Image (cartoon, rainbow, N blue to C red):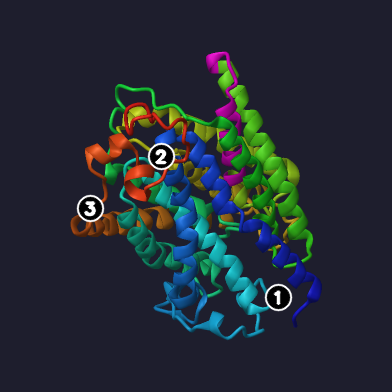
Amino acid sequence: MIDRADTLLVMTCAAMALLLTPAMGLFFAGMVRRKNALSAFLGCLTPLGIVTLQWLLLGQGLAFGRDLFGGLIGVPDGALFHLRPEPRGDLATTIPGPLFLSFQMLAAAFAAALVSSAGAERARFAATAVFVLLWTTFVYDPVAHWIWSPDGWLRKFGARDFAGGLVVHAAAGAAALCVARAVGKRRGSDVESLRPHNLPLTATGTALLWFAWLGFNAGHAWGVSTGAVAAFVATIAGGAAGMAAWSLVESTTTGKATFLGACTGVVAGLVGVSAGAGYVAPPAAAVLGATAALIAHGAILVKGRLGYDDSLDVFGVHGVAGVAGAIGLGLLADSAVDPGVVGLFEGRVELIVAQLVAVAAVVAYTVVATTALLFVVDRTMGLRVSPEDEELGLDLTQHGQRGYVLGEGERLGASYR
């Protein structure tokens, strides 16, 4: 039966969650060089358009349609073409089906935006757009079916992911590592200091992300409930703890707590708490956020030794923190918040085993499938821009515009960095 209060809450949360992709675009646009600011923003915004159309035609059915092949994939059914009122899924029983599917569409778009951004400053726009379409269809949709569909094999096995720590962030982070390795390092990354060009822009993105994340996490409770309140509080606690932990470790190791580190810590904390947002108490949410931020910080420190150039740290922040949060849920899930989800620290081993299996399955499948898709796109279209285009900047060479116009006499490419 449709409940008006639940429906209104989820609609409000969906409106907030719509900010996730453009907010992440602002966050990333400030982190790149100014000649690539528009390109970095479009790397997040364009997938929102692509995935929306894909979701209408295929995605919603592949992820949440009638099960096919034993919990591996669903069947496209065109549910969003009919605005049918029937609820969808085993959790969203009091809201209209199209609202549930539209909310999940935003999750798919956010994941695609993260993957798209892994090739920032050197990937071709057209090739990235095609790859986003393929990745959403062949990687994200099946993974969402496994964990979020009531028929999914990992959900039946006992794995849980409240708001995308595993489905969105771990999957997107693993895919981002594949993208970063496939397109190669940015020109000059070994000899130049490729600093962010506009940290206030990144700060604006951080603030909007935190606000949008509140709606995204709370909305996954699918109504007015204890889970919605727990997710709301956990999102505040996780982001705050992540920022504090990141700043503390920077102060301890380098003597300075950086501005970019504080912003990155917020995002890492939000990622870390997403999987367990509606299943843990506030103190546990703070632990998840802080732990995820610390582990993500370590992952970023060692990326240079591993020989890949993840220019926006999608793997380090989203992938690593997402995995940490999904495993942490298996330890800290609180029966007082949700009696059906009990962690190891309360004496139950089933959840932590299911979480470990889910992490291994999602990461392994994502890496194999993403690598195959990148190979196909690279061979048919080419993933990377030419050295000349990369030097001039993707804003001009891929989109024909500049993010900043500093003077009429400025010669193209000479000082536009």
- Mark 1 / mark 3, whichever is N-terminal: 1
Rate crowding at label 3 as few (under 14), some (14 to 19) or many (20 or more) other CA atoms within 10 Å: some
Residue visible at 55% across and 31% down in the picture: 199
Which of these two is toward me, 370 or 129?
Answer: 129
**Bounds of the magenta segment:** 253-271
In the rendered image, residue 237 lying in the magenta stretch gets the answer: no
Amino acid type of the residue that numbered disc 1 sits on in the rendered structure: Ile
Q: Do we see residue 210 in this rendering? A: yes
Residue visible at 45% across and 30% down in the picture: 407
Residue assigned mark 1: 95
**How many dots with numbers?**
3
Q: Is residue 280 left or right of residue 291?
A: right
Which of these two is toward me, 208 or 349?
Answer: 208
Which of these two is toward me, 271 or 129?
Answer: 129
Residue at the limit of the structure toward the right, as seen here: 5
The spot of residue 121 in percent (x, y) is 36, 40
The answer for how far apart the CA atoms under marks 1 and 3 are is 44 Å
Element type where label 1 sits in the image: loop
Disc number lying in front (1 or 2): 2
Q: Is residue 281 left or right of residue 14?
A: right
Rate crowding at label 1 as few (under 14), some (14 to 19) or many (20 or more) other CA atoms within 10 Å: many
Residue 9, above or below 343: below
Residue at the limit of the structure toward the left, as seen here: 379
Q: Are marks 1 and 2 in contact (CB under 8 Å)?
A: no
Amino acid type of the residue that numbered disc 2 sits on in the rendered structure: Asn
Residue 181, above or below 370: above
The spot of residue 387 in percent (x, y) is 23, 38
Residue assigned mark 2: 36
Residue assigned mark 3: 382
Residue at the limit of the structure toward the top, as seen here: 255
Residue visible at 65% across and 84% down in the picture: 86
